[in-house]
Image (cartoon, helix red, strand yellow):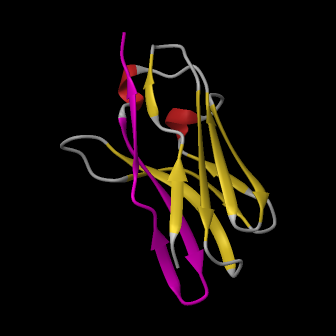
């Protein structure tokens, strides 16, 4: 299974970015986004199940929105970005046979 992520980049504090990720299979239970900042462990950002149930980390509630265009595509709309949101963002998919990860996309929030 391959996950192709896109949409990262450089944005000023308070700005917005939208990440997208498409999986090469439709046999997916849930998809989500994680992030890893330099010197820190990878952490959950948001997940969404096949049925549309969502889960968010406290630090993004009210600012980020996860959604699915279809079974194999997940988006992350990030608003009111802060410098501490700077990290490599990884797409994740939970499958019946295991877990798959995308290659990561850099998000940098800086003035």
Is 75 in the magenta?
Answer: no
Q: Nearer the viewer, residue 31 or 6?
A: 6
Residue ID at (69%, 82%): 27
Residue 11 x/y as whole percent: 46, 20
Q: Is residue 69 left or right of residue 41?
A: right
100 or 61: nearer the viewer: 100
Magenta residues, start to end: 87-111
Residue visible at 40% across and 53% down in the picture: 104
- Which quarter shows the C terminus? top left
Find residue 20 and report its horizontal and vertical position in percent.
Answer: 61, 48
Q: Is residue 37 above or below residue 51?
A: above
Residue 72 position in % (x across, y down): 70, 67
Instruction: Assign the magenta stretch its main secondary structure.
Output: strand
Residue 21: quadrant of the picture: bottom right
In the image, what residue occupies the spot 37% across and 28% down?
108
Q: Quadrant of residue 69?
A: bottom right
Q: Is residue 38 above or below residue 74?
A: above
- Whether residue 103 appears in magenta in the rendering, the answer is yes
């Amino acid at each position: 299974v391959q996950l192709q992520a896109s949409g990262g980049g450089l944005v000023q504090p308070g700005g917005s970015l939208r990440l997208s990720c498409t999986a090469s299979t439709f046999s997916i239970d849930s998809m989500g986004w994680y992030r890893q900042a330099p010197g820190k462990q990878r952490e959950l950002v948001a997940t969404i199940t096949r049925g549309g149930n969502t889960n968010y980390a406290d630090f993004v509630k009210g600012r980020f929105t996860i959604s699915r265009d279809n079974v194999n595509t997940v988006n992350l709309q990030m608003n009111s970005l802060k410098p501490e949101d700077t990290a490599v963002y990884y797409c994740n998919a939970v499958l019946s046979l295991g877990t798959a990860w995308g290659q990561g996309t850099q998000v940098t929030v800086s003035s």
